[in-house]
Image: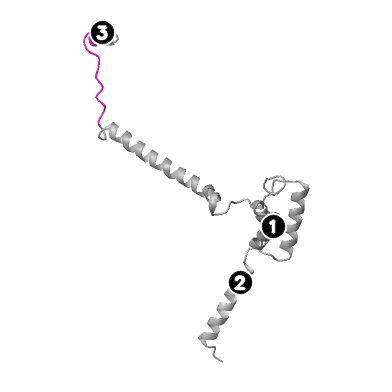
Amino acid sequence: MRRSPLLVAIAAALLALAAAAAAAPQTSLTDIEDEVMCPICGTLLELSDSPQARRQKVFIAEMIAAGRSKEQIKDALVAEYGREVLALPRGSGFDLSAYLVPVLAFVVAAVALALGVRRWRRDAGPPGAQSAAPGPRGEDAERLEDDLARYDL
């Protein structure tokens, strides 16, 4: 009995889909705790030990046991406690500045550094050239020569 290549390909695809579904990451309490705040303390849920934080942890554990995804759990927390329960700011409005300000500061610092290096290299002259600082003149030059001659061995 000969198997058709189409049946073999379909079986392989179904097997790959089953393996991918089995390998899908499971949500855990520690995975969510670092992205959610305690509404009473205003600290990360993983750092808080208030009675409210303990209730939230139980709520999250129940939702994990029910097979909810991370996004579903976060949506349920927002519905229960409001938008302030999320530790990460939204990507719109004023909250967008939490993402843009560090990027802009980095760009400004990089440009300032590049300009500073360019100026420093320009002022240093061509590679290998030593700066031509003027030496002592007149009476100072004679005194320097006398002092150096005194220390000649």
Q: Residue 151 in the image: state x and y as whole percent.
A: 30, 9
N-terminal-most mark, 1 or 3: 1
Q: Residue 100 in the image: state x and y as whole percent.
A: 49, 48
Q: Residue at x 22, y 13 (%)?
A: 137
N-terminal-most mark, 1 or 2: 2
Q: Nearer the viewer, residue 38 or 69?
A: 38
Q: At label 2, which amino acid type do we have?
A: Ala
- Chain part drawn in magenta: 129-142
Q: At label 1, which amino acid type do we have?
A: Leu
Q: In the figure, 151 relative to 39: above or below?
A: above
Q: In the figure, 38 relative to 119: above or below?
A: below
Instruction: Determine which of the numbered discs, if any, sits on residue 19 in the image.
Output: 2
Left or right of 21 in this view: 130: left
Classify the position of the N terminus by image quarter.
bottom right
Q: Which residue is mark 3?
A: 143
Q: Residue at x 36, y 40 (%)?
A: 114
Quadrant hosting residue 119: top left
Gap between marks 1 and 2, in whole Å? 31 Å
Gap between marks 1 and 3, in whole Å? 84 Å
Magenta-colored stretch includes residue 136: yes
Q: Which residue is mark 1?
A: 77
